[in-house]
Image (cartoon, coloured by chain):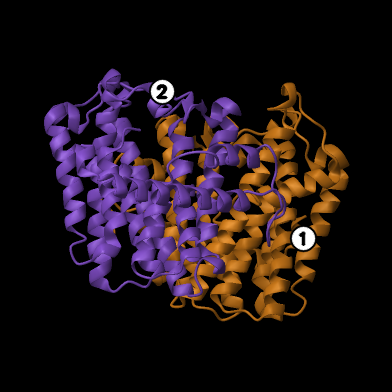
Chain colours: A orange, B purple
Amino acid sequence: MSSALPTAETGDLASSLARTAQAIESLLEALLSAAPRDSEIARPEPLLSAMRHGALGGGKRLRPFLTVETARLLRGDAGQALRAGAAVELVHCYSLVHDDLPAMDDDDTRRGRPTVHKAYDEATAILAGDSLLTLAFDVMADEATHPSGEIRAALVLALARASGLGGMAGGQMLDLAAEGRFDGGRPRSLTEAEIRRLQAMKTGALLAASVEIGALIAGAAPEARAALVGYGRALGAAFQVADDILDIEATPEALGKATAKDQDRGKATLVSVLGLDAAKRERDRLSAEAIAALAGFGPEADVLRAAARFAAERTS
Amino acid sequence: MSSALPTAETGDLASSLARTAQAIESLLEALLSAAPRDSEIARPEPLLSAMRHGALGGGKRLRPFLTVETARLLRGDAGQALRAGAAVELVHCYSLVHDDLPAMDDDDTRRGRPTVHKAYDEATAILAGDSLLTLAFDVMADEATHPSGEIRAALVLALARASGLGGMAGGQMLDLAAEGRFDGGRPRSLTEAEIRRLQAMKTGALLAASVEIGALIAGAAPEARAALVGYGRALGAAFQVADDILDIEATPEALGKATAKDQDRGKATLVSVLGLDAAKRERDRLSAEAIAALAGFGPEADVLRAAARFAAERTS
């Protein structure tokens, strides 16, 4: 559907994404340097290396991009938004390190490289995930992220609520349960409503929080914040349906990881419930819903509109 | 050394510990109830149950006790201190759930009950630990914990720095490395200085943070805060040497977990480096050092002094 995405806009989005990805990479590199910071005792190897393996050198950095672009839309500080976005990305990276573990999704490669437990070992991967998660809150609560303690505490709260039991981790639990890890090991068919809830938790919550955190950085008014959270939720849902579709349609080379895993595992996705064509229509509907949530903003929100299209139409 | 601990004081400490433990249990019970809170989507089983298994029904709750008693000493708010102490305890509980995993210390029982991965499974235990850690920051950043956002952000930062790469998780990494998980699987003998650093990170950092967090809740002046952090560090070190001694001297029944594990694993402890008698003297010296750090306080700090003796002289 590249016809829906004019070349100029694609170019703008691609260069904006690349610019933020580069800035995030530099910031994560600095946050994961060997020198202990204030009140830290030491930064032991190989834990630091494993954290760097899990956090550096890859990914679209879509979550920090959403944080940075939302803050920019509302004239928030770019450096603050970047730090807050890095904290969100650290949570995303921790979740990948733990999800890849043998006891979880048991994946050997990620972004074309060995997963952390393959490059190191399981114990190190567990601790690296734990430490990336902890570092996310460290970064968010640090004065460098925002001068107001009220805002920093609100940022920590938004990130924690989106990531834990009631958000991402809870969604991963529902996903494992649906794959038949319990109840005698048989995959359970979920209803469409159950799949939507699972995906809203596993993927949607952190994507929506990425947007909300950008709004918090910029001190958004309640209406603007609510509209942007609506945008983030719809974008997150579109992103996940697109993921389910890519699992069927993309090549392992394009994704940098194995494909057709959902089908092999008998996993319930919107594709399995609705069929491929209806799932694509739903993906496009959600993308349009995200764009509609931005109706109150002018052309300055075009990058976020393009991101909503990208979330749906990406090929990797 | 019960002669150092008069009966009246022991009674006071025991009843104070029990009172805080009960209050923490009630608060954790409420924090781990089934109803989703503001901005949470759902609280899925069996993740919630596994978190409850890992956090409820046991332990001395020494860390929240230190937070509560430090805040009380400085006339801080008791309810705020209890919430902050519960956040610290959630971090402690997460660390136990993950440390017990097969890839880590591979323990089947904890406090006389099956460990979380035995009662559930590994994937659920990993996610339960992750979610307990995330909940800790959620609780700390919540307005109910302190009216000042500046203080809440400082609490989050103190907890994160003590728990992550540069603190507890880093200490666990050093511990696994010393046990010979890497470098061909042979235990490595550590120097006394290396053991002290490992223990300061693995156990000491969070115990010291428990005290510091109580001081932050009460808005302590810098000198009082520094004295209390010194107390916390020495108490933490005493606690860990006592732990190493208990591993040799206590029965599995008294500890509710296997003993002589350190020796079996060829693990480097202060007992293995100094010998049992010298380790006991060092434990008592550290306990006295903790008490000396409280010299600027009057009899209102007697409970903390008793806690320093207890950390050294406990039998379980």
Split into 4 quadrants, where in the image is the C terminus of chain B? top left
Instruction: Give me the chain letter of mark 1.
Output: A
**Horizontal side, residue B217 vs residue A207: left or right:** left
Residue A287 numbered tag? 1
- Name the foreground residue: A128 vs B311: B311
Asked if residue B166 is positioned above or below residue A187 in the image, the reply reads below
Residue furthest out toward the top: B264
Instruction: Determine the CA span between mark 1 and mark 2.
Output: 59 Å
Horizontal and vertical percent position of residue B48:
64, 42
Give the left or right position of residue A47, taking residue A90 as reference.
left
Residue B49 rendering spot, x and y as whole percentages = 64, 38
Is the residue A78 above or below the residue A254 in the image?
below
Q: Please state which amino acid type lies under the numbered disc 2.
A: Glu
Which chain contains the residue that carries disc 2? B
Residue kind at label 1, given as amino acid type = Ser
> Is A141 located above or below residue A181 in the figure?
below
Return the x and y of residue A316 as percentages of the image width and height: 64, 46
Q: What element does badge 2 sit on?
A: helix
Total numbered circles: 2
Residue located beneath label 2 in the image: B253
Horizontal relation, residue B5 to residue A125: left or right: left
Indicate the position of residue B249 as horizontal and vertical percent values: 27, 24
- In front: A78, or B213? B213
Res. A87 visible in picture = no
Nearer to us of marks 1 and 2 is 2
Which residue is painted at 61% across and 77% down in the image? A73
